[in-house]
Amino acid sequence: MSVEPRPQPASHPAYRAQRSFGSLDGVRCLCILPVLWHHAGVSSDLRLLGRGFLGVDMFFVLSGFLIVTLLLRERDRTGGVSLRRFYARRTLRIFPPYYGLLLALAVAYGLLRTAEEGDPFFGALPVYLLYVSNWSTLQAPNLAIMWSLATEEQFYLVWPACEKWIRRSWIPAVLAAWLALNQAINFGWLDSVFAGLYGTPTVPDLSILDTTFTPICLGVILAHLLHERRWFDRLAPLLQGRLMAPLLLGSLVLEAQLTPADLSGWPRLLVHLTMAAWLGSLVVREDHALAGLLRLRPIARIGAISYGMYLYHLWVFHVARLANEQLGLDFLAALFVTGGLLTILVAELSFRFLETPFLGWKRRFESGGAAPA
């Protein structure tokens, strides 16, 4: 549902009545394109251009905020949270393309019988099927990015149940403990614990050690703060200036450029906090200064199909890389351009013919009312 920009900053009742946040597909576009750039492997001396992986962190902030905002509004309307409907919605949205890809790969590797790539795939398949690849050192070609989807699924599994069953007065303490634990990992205070857990003298290369749950936690905290009127009234004056959105986005760009090569510790925490503040500036009012850009149809469409783009892009890049070699396309960022365009095409086809039918079923489990799109 499209929403016309409001001429004035939003009040708390207006925010709570907002059925969709019009800029967030644009945000998804600004998340997925840097990820594609990062995986295209374009070399550059500019540190900013090597930080495309931060798009995944912003996806996490966005996910935490949207999921919990939906749950809080459902609880206010109905007096509770329906986990059955929540998990039905998530299953119908996430599972079809994800398990469809794994099934296609299993069939392909089974038929081709290529041990070099097939054996790693079938060896790691259980961790992908169970969404635990973020805790495993087993990986298969072009599937290492599944760690982020595993992180999301673990969040979906655990946190909605917390919102349903934990007393509201205990939620701040739980969030504080969650954040503190992840920051202990972020600052390296638990490196020896993880090294011992995995039986290695050094910390294994696990993305969970990059505090991937911190940005989700910050999104959850933002959802709670904006949902409560007293906190909304304190935060909105800081975030709802029309120029705050571009200023905070500019801050993110500068942080990506100026922070050290090793983001662990304060640099990564600073980036995550700025991401949460930027998201807040985009949702407290609809007519912020970036609204026109983020709602452009091509940008919004890329955001709408960004899940499929993320899921398929390494495989598409693999094909594009082979095609580029055959065609002699070796200009700077050739893989990003050709692979990116092919990824958009594949994701669009997936969205129209695979995902959309399931999205139709998903609407049967919507709770109705002012839920954020």
Image (cartoon, rainbow, N blue to C red):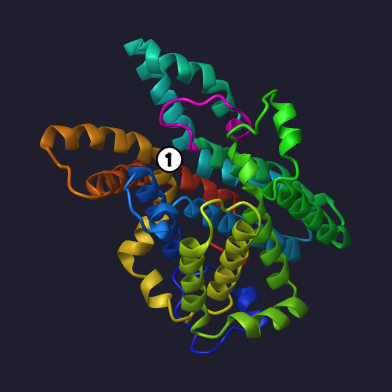
Q: Position of residue 340 (x, y in %)?
A: 29, 48
Q: Position of residue 262 (x, y in %)?
A: 55, 51
Q: Quadrant of residue 289?
A: bottom left
Q: Which residue is mark 1?
A: 311
Q: Residue at x 81, y 53 (%)?
A: 177
Q: Residue at x 24, y 37 (%)?
A: 320
Q: Residue at x 42, y 44 (%)?
A: 310
Quick check: 269 above or below 184? below
Q: Position of residue 338 (x, y in %)?
A: 22, 46
Q: Quadrant of residue 283?
A: bottom right
Q: Is 228 colored magenta in this rendering?
A: no
User: Most prominent secondary structure in the magenta stretch?
Assistant: loop
Secondary structure type for disc 1: helix
Q: Is 137 colored magenta in this rendering?
A: yes
What's under tag 1, amino acid-wise?
A: Leu
* Residue neighbourhood size for the residue with mark 1, other residues' Cα within 10 Å, grouped as few (<14), some (14–19), many (≥20): many
Question: Residue 265: in sight, yes or no?
Answer: yes
Foreground of the two, 73 or 129? 129
Instruction: Tell me which segment is drawn in magenta.
Output: 132-145
Q: Residue at x 35, y 55 (%)?
A: 45
Q: Position of residue 94 (x, y in %)?
A: 52, 41
Seen as rendered, the residue at the extreme left is 327
